[in-house]
Image (cartoon, coloured by chain):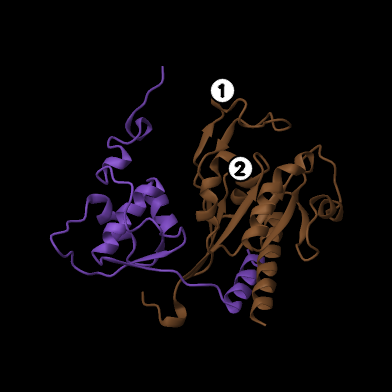
Amino acid sequence: MDFGPSDEPVALKILIAGGFGVGKTTLVGAISEIRPLRTEEVLSDRGIGIDDVDGVEGKTTTTVAMDFGRITIREGLVVYLFGTPGQERFWFMWDELSYGALGAVVLADTRRLTDCFPSIDYFEQRGTPFIVAVNCFDGADRHEAEDVRVALDLDVDVPVLLCDVRRRVSAKTVLVTLVEHSLRVLTASQS
Amino acid sequence: MTNWMDEDAGPVVRPYALIGGRTRSSGDKLDLVAMVTSTRGAPSGGFVPGPEQERILAMVTTPTSVADVASDLNLPLGVVRVLLGDLQDHKLISIGRASASERILKEVINGLRAL
C-alpha cells in the first residue's frame, strides 16, 4: 500500500507507570487488542529483600521487561501501550521508553501511595504529560481523587481519577483522559 | 516428569548467536514505535540477509513498528535492533517516526471512545 506524505503511518506511545504490583499489566490487558507481550518471571527467592510485596502477597510474577499492547485506531494510526518496569532495578529502561512518548498514566494504589512518587518525579522532570489513575483495589479505601492530589502534591492541571483497571470501560476512560490532557499540553505549547 | 519438547524447550539457537554475538549496531537508537518499511531494494556489497532478516523483510512490506517486529519474531529487542541496523545500513529498510499533531490526537480520542 502507498502512503502519501499526509498519510504517513503514525504510531503513538503511551506509558503505563506506577509501583510494583499496582495493576499495570491488568490495565494493558483490559484495553489492548493483543495480549501484552509478557516478559514476566516467577518471583523467586532472588527477589527477597529486593521486591517489596507488602500488601500484594498474592502476586507471584513480576514484569522484568515490558508489557506491550496495541490499539488500532484505524489503518495507519496505532496506539501502543508500554508498561514501565515497576522495580527500581529496571530504571535504566525508562529513558528509552519515555523518549517521544505521548504521555504517561501513573497508576496509584492508595495502600502504598508512596510507590508512585518516583514515577511522578520522573515525568515531572522530563516534562512528559501524565495523569494519575487511582486503582481502586478490593479492600482498599476509596480515597477521593482530590485527597490523592493533595497527598501527592500534584499541580492543579494534572488530572487525577479513580479507576478499576480490570474493567475495559474504566481503562478506556483512563486513556481518553490522558490523551485529552496531552492534547491540552500540546495546544498550550503551540499558542 | 516435565517434558520440554519443541518450542517449550526454548530456542535451539541462542538469540545473540543470530547476530554473531554483537550487541551494538546502527540500530541501537531505534525507537520502539519507529516504523520500519521495506525499500524493496536489492542487497548490496555482498550482504546476505540471514533467515531472521528475511522474515523481517517479508513482514515490513507494510510499515511495521520496531516493537511489533520484535514481538512477532519473538526475539529480544536488543537482537532485533541489531538485525534492523544491518538492514538499514544496506538500505533494505527505511525507518520513519511521524509525530503527533493536534488532528491526530483528536482522532485518537474519538477512536478510543468508540472502542
Residue B13 - label? none
Q: Is residue A33 visible?
A: no
Which chain corresponds to the colour brown?
A
Q: Is residue A114 visible?
A: yes
Secondary structure under tag 1 reads helix
* Pointer 2 residue: A86
Residue B99 sits above or below residue B5 on the image: below
**Along the horizontal axis of the image, is A169 left or right of A90?**
right
Cα separation, mark 1 vs mark 2, equals 18 Å
> Relative to the observer, which residue lies in front, A127 or A69?
A127
**Along the horizontal axis of the image, is A131 left or right of A36?**
right
> Relative to the observer, which residue lies in front, B65 or B107?
B65
Residue in the image at 80% along x and 54% along y: A153
Question: How many C-alpha atoms fall within 10 Å of the one at disc 1: few (<14), some, or many (≥20)?
Answer: few
Residue A45 - label? 1
- Pointer 1 and pointer 2 on the same chain: yes
- Where on the picture, by quarter, is residue A2? bottom left
Sequence-first disc among 1 and 2? 1
Residue in the image at 50% along x and 43% along y: A65
Q: Position of residue A176 (x, y in %)?
A: 68, 64
Host chain of mark 2: A
Q: Colour of chain B?
A: purple
Residue in the image at 26% along x and 63% along y: B89
Residue in the image at 65% along x and 76% along y: A189
Host chain of mark 1: A
